[in-house]
């Protein structure tokens, strides 16, 4: 018994079927945008401002300087 192909094999080709390729490119674009946004949010979170550091200021540079 011979196997009869009903469908054109070009329908599975990425460049030939614009419907399948456009859906694939749309989801690829959505995935890339979501990955970029999550990566940016994580980078902002990891480099966030951690608070006011304790800085030693010399006395002669104050608003009212004190000298020895």
Image: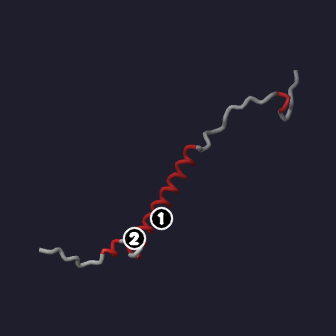
Give the residue at x 41% y 76%. 18
* Label 1 residue SS: helix
Q: Which residue is mark 2?
A: 14
**Which quadrant of the figure has residue 22?**
bottom left
- Percent position of residue 61, x then y: 84, 32
Residue 36 or residue 56, whichever sits in front: 36
- Percent position of residue 46, x then y: 55, 43
Q: Which residue is mark 1?
A: 29
Horizontal side of residue 35 vs 54, given as left or right: left
* Label 2 residue SS: loop
Residue that extends furthest to the top in the rendered view of this protein: 68
Residue 33 or residue 2, whichever sits in front: 2
Q: Disc 1 to disc 2, how far (Cα)?
A: 16 Å
Give the residue at x 11% y 74%. 1
Between tags 1 and 2, which lies in front? 2
Image marks 1 and 2: residues in contact by CB distance under 8 Å: no
Going from N to C along the chain, the mark reached first, 1 or 2, is: 2
């Amino acid at each position: 018994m011979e196997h009869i192909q009903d469908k054109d094999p070009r329908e599975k080709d990425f460049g030939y079927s614009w419907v399948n390729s456009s859906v694939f490119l749309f989801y690829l674009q959505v995935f890339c945008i979501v990955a970029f946004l999550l990566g940016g949010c994580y980078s902002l979170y990891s480099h966030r401002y951690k608070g006011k550091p304790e800085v030693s200021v010399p006395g002669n540079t104050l608003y009212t300087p004190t000298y020895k």
